[in-house]
Amino acid sequence: MAKTKYNILDVINGISEVVMGIYDGVHDTSYVSNEEPKSIGLSREEGHMIYDSRVIDGFGCKFVGRNLILNYSGECRISDVHQTNFEDDILATVEKVISFIKKEYRKNNSASISLNQITKDPVVTVQYLSKVKGRFSVTVVYEISNLEEEATTSPYEKRFDKKFKKFLELKSDKKAENQKPAARKNDKENY
């Protein structure tokens, strides 16, 4: 069975709509009025917002051509960085975010998208904020694979080509003559 092809602009708008609906507190029933709470899989969803110490983490998406670039960053303790499963936990959270985006896109648009990871081994970078705290970030690139083929030429390009060629035909090999301004009568008096 052939996969359905989607327009790239519709897919970008759909993913942007999903990401726009994600904010801190969307997972808690006391902060969401009409909708059901959404669990994304971020570390900030664990614990109570006021009583527990807050973990700051989040993600952002951007689009480059047919690719979705997901940036995930947050704060961590330096003691956690030296554990063997630190990178695996962060990459698992990235996978939870991607599965959440796919699920919400399917729910909002009644269509599914296919995201294939291009980045083979994402690198988790850690910056030291102090001897106790650090900041991590990871960037993973995904290809949106079920999109329509883009047209190579558009009617605007054809129209532009005609006008541009007409402009280039105006070129001449003649050298412009330097024209000197006519001498004014009272030039010497003014100086």
Image: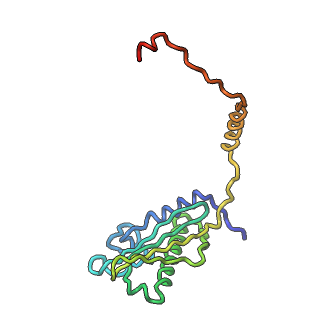
Q: Which color mode does the image show?
A: rainbow
Observer-nearest of 187 and 31: 187
Observer-nearest of 109 and 39: 39
| Residue furthest left as drawn | 51
Q: Position of residue 156 (x, y in %)?
A: 66, 43
Up/down of 94 relative to 145, above or below? below
Q: Is residue 22 left or right of residue 112?
A: left
- Residue 136: image quadrant is bottom left
The quadrant in which the N terminus is found is bottom right
| Residue furthest bottom as drawn | 84
Q: Position of residue 175 (x, y in %)?
A: 68, 28
Q: Is residue 131 left or right of residue 14?
A: left
Observer-nearest of 21 and 29: 21
Q: Is residue 169 left or right of residue 147?
A: right
- Residue 171: image quadrant is top right
Q: Position of residue 118 (x, y in %)?
A: 61, 72
- Residue 191: image quadrant is top left
Up/down of 64 relative to 172, above or below? below
How many numbered tags mark residues here?
A: 0
Up/down of 44 relative to 155, above or below? below
Q: Position of residue 143 (x, y in %)?
A: 61, 68
Going 35% across and 80% down the picture, which residue do you hit?
A: 133
Q: Is residue 174 left or right of residue 115?
A: right
Going 37% across and 81% down the picture, which residue do you hit?
A: 46
